[in-house]
Amino acid sequence: MNLLDGKVTAAAYKEKIAKEVSELKASGNRAPHLAAVLVGENPASVAYVNGKVKDCDEVGFKSTLIRLPEDISQEDLLSKVEELNNDEGLDGFIVQLPLPKHIDEKTVTLAIDPKKDVDGFHPENVGRMALNLPTYLPATPHGILMMLEHYNIETSGKHCVVIGRSNIVGSPMSILMARNANPGNATVTLTHSRTADLKAECLRADIIIAAIGKANFLTADMVKPGAVVIDVGINRVEDASRKRGYRLTGDVDFEGVSEKASWLTPVPGGVGLMTRVALLQNTLQAARG
Ligand code: GUN
């Protein structure tokens, strides 16, 4: 089994991005500028957003973190989004999800100017992705494509099984793998909780992308020898021996599947790092215009 190493891949892309930022600045442009809006104190969201700010620093981007109280009204949040839409000193921004229950995520997503929607969540950008038009690709699927490209993993003509049909990972991933593009040109099966025989579907796969959010869900008996396995899961599993009382584990039973797969992503140190790099890539694209 070969490791699809997120640390190595993310570092390679970050170096490329940092070099492009230097060139942009050398030719008189300002640094790319990303803003992140964080509503409330959700610990996972705080950690994600802090990671994004740190990534920006590393590649020479400007970043702005906008922290808003948990009880902010939807109207006030929409005013903030409008202000960011009109801020010419800003290339792109994200509103970290999930939002508090009293705020409708769809309404907020629709309010973001598609040109600044570096998450690629606005329906206009989702449509552009489906039509293979230039757009911002959602960060996790984009990061996975960048990883496949970095390791020269052949996808054309391969059978790809995606597990999970979420709006931010499984559904866009299935569209991207089937597109006439490289990586892409795969024959794709999108599976979900109502799939009749998931094991049989997985056993036919040359490439499996697991994005269901269940710890150690994909086991060795579901994997064809030589398959490429991408683990999108980040699950907290109780572990009293750890300082925080939990450890992170993916949707794939790493130990078992490593006996079968030709390539496999670890958790942590795999797709999560690529998601962060993909957001940087989208922001650079926004800055270039
Ligand atoms: N919450 C979990 N993943 C994401 C993401 O990629 N973007 C935003 N905005 N929120 C998230």
Image: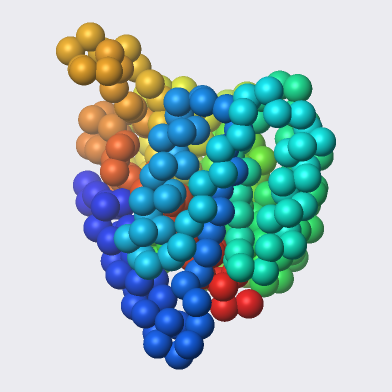
Residues 85 and 52: in front is: 85
Percent of width and height locating residue 44: 45, 29
Color scheme of the displayed model? rainbow
Percent of width and height locating residue 224: 38, 40
Percent of width and height locating residue 139: 53, 52
Percent of width and height locating residue 90: 61, 64
Rendered residue at 57%/73% (across/down): 287
Q: In the picture, residue 96 is in which quadrant?
A: top right
Q: In the picture, residue 234 is in which quadrant?
A: top left
Report the side of 125 relative to 91 (left or right).
right
Q: Is residue 239 above or below residue 14?
A: above
Split into 4 quadrants, where in the image is the C terminus?
Answer: bottom right
Farthest residue in the bottom direction?
A: 27
Rendered residue at 39%/71% (across/down): 17
Rendered residue at 36%/59% (across/down): 57
Residues 73 and 188: in front is: 73
User: Is residue 233 at all visible to an observer of this figure?
Assistant: no
Residues 219 and 113: in front is: 113
Q: Is residue 167 above or below residue 178?
A: above
Rendered residue at 36%/65% (across/down): 59
Residues 90 and 124: in front is: 90
Report the side of 115 relative to 58 (left or right).
right
Farthest residue in the top direction?
A: 240
The image shows a total of numbered marks equal to: 0
Q: Is residue 192 above or below residue 275?
A: above
Farthest residue in the left direction?
A: 241
User: Is residue 264 at all visible to an observer of this figure?
Assistant: yes
